[in-house]
Amino acid sequence: MQIRSLVILFFIFGLCFFVACSSKKPAQSRTLSLSINSPLIKFSEQGFLYEDKTSLKLEVYKLGQIFFALNIRDKICINQVCYEKKVFNEKFFKFTHYEDLMQDILKFQPIYEGKNVIQNECGFIQEIQASNFNILYEVCENRLEFKDLLNHLFVKIKK
C-alpha cells in the first residue's frame, strides 16, 4: 500500500512539472538588420530580437560573436550593464523621453501613445517636436526609421 501511494505521489508531481513547463510560451525570435547612430552606440550589423511576455532581448553579432546585447525588462541592460529606463533614454537618445520608448521602437509600435500618427498604405509616420528633440518616425511593413533631427541620431531596422 505504501509503495502504491509513493507511485501515485511521484505521478502527480511529474504531471504537475510537465504541465508547468509546457504552459510557458516560448520566446519569438526575428532576424534584423540594424543601423544605430547614437551617443551611446554606433553600428550597422545583423542581429536577433527575442520577445516574450515580459522581456525583449536584442543580440547583435559581428564576425559570428555577440558584441552587443540589449535586454529590456524592468530596466534596460546593455552588455550586462543595467540602467533605469529613463537613464538609458538620456544616454541613448540625449533626452529622458518616456520609459518604454526603446521597447515601442523594437516592437515597431507607434511612440508617444500614437501622438501625430498618420496612417499610410504600408504603416504609419509620426512627427513629434519639442524643445529638446525633433523626431521623425516611420514604420512601413518590415522597415523602421527613427530619426531625431535635433540630436543627430537614428535607428534603422529591417526585419
Image: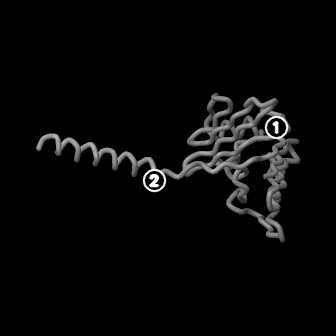
Sequence order check, earlier mark of 2 and 1:
2
Q: Residue at x 70, y 46 (%)?
A: 102
**Closer to the camera, 25 or 81?**
25
In the image: residue 72, left or right of residue 133: left
- Given the image, on which type of amino acid does mark 2 rest? Ser
**Closer to the camera, 118 or 35?**
35
Q: Which-is-in-front pick, marks 2 and 1? A: 2
**Closer to the camera, 104 or 31?**
31
Task: Label 2, secondary structure: give it.
Answer: loop
In the image: residue 86, left or right of residue 19: right
Q: Residue furthest left?
A: 1
- Given the image, on which type of amino acid does mark 1 rest? Ser
Which residue lies under the disc numbered 2?
23
Return the x and y of residue 133 as percentages of the image width and height: 81, 48
Task: Label 1, secondary structure: give it.
Answer: loop
Q: Residue at x 80, y 40 (%)?
A: 46
Which residue lies under the disc numbered 1?
38
Return the x and y of residue 146 as percentages of the image width and height: 82, 50
| Number of marks present in the image shown | 2
